[in-house]
Amino acid sequence: MRTILALLVSNCFMTYAWYGHLKKAGEVPLIKLIFISWGIAFFEYLFMVPANNKYALQEGYSAFQLKTIQEVISLAVFCAFAIFFLKEPFKWNYAVSFALIIGAVYFMFYPSR
């Protein structure tokens, strides 16, 4: 559970570092945006590194499972960010895409024989 919580927090920082400036695109010089994003990414790494190393090993996730969890969390965080911060509409085809990804998660954790 610590792995998932750390990944969630890290993805919140990552999403803001990557997409938080889209509302003011063109108003801020690119080099300034890069340094701001790197500063925010520092906090992302404070959560991402332990999630991908210490916690994941302790909780028994394989590398494939860990990456799948991270991608689903990343998409969920981005979806909320795009709707509530960027004010982008959520369309039916996005829902279908996410459902297919959830199907992939099912198979990732399906016990192999």
Image (tube, grey):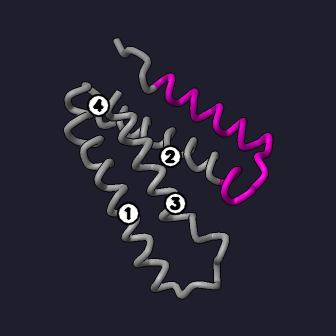
Q: CA distance from mark 1 to mark 3?
A: 9 Å
Q: CA distance from mark 2 to mark 1?
A: 14 Å
Towards the viewer: 85 or 64: 85
Q: Name the residue carrying label 4.
A: 62
Q: Which amino acid type corresponds to the residue marked 4 in the rendered image?
A: Ser
Q: Earlier in the sequence, mark 2 or mark 1?
A: 1
Q: Which amino acid type corresponds to the residue marked 1 in the rendered image?
A: Ala
**Labelled disc at residue 23:** none
Kind of element beneath mark 2: helix
- Specify whether residue 1 is painted magenta: no
**Residue 36 versus residue 45 in the image, above or below:** below
The residue mark sitting in front, 4 or 3, is: 3
The residue mark sitting in front, 3 or 2, is: 3
Kind of element beneath mark 4: loop
Q: CA distance from mark 3 to mark 2?
A: 11 Å
- Residue at coordinates 30% horizontally, 37% vertically from top-left? 63
Q: Which amino acid type corresponds to the residue marked 3 in the rendered image?
A: Tyr
**Labelled disc at residue 16:** 3
**Residue 28 versus residue 44 in the image, above or below:** below
- Residue at coordinates 32% horizontally, 48% vertically from top-left? 47
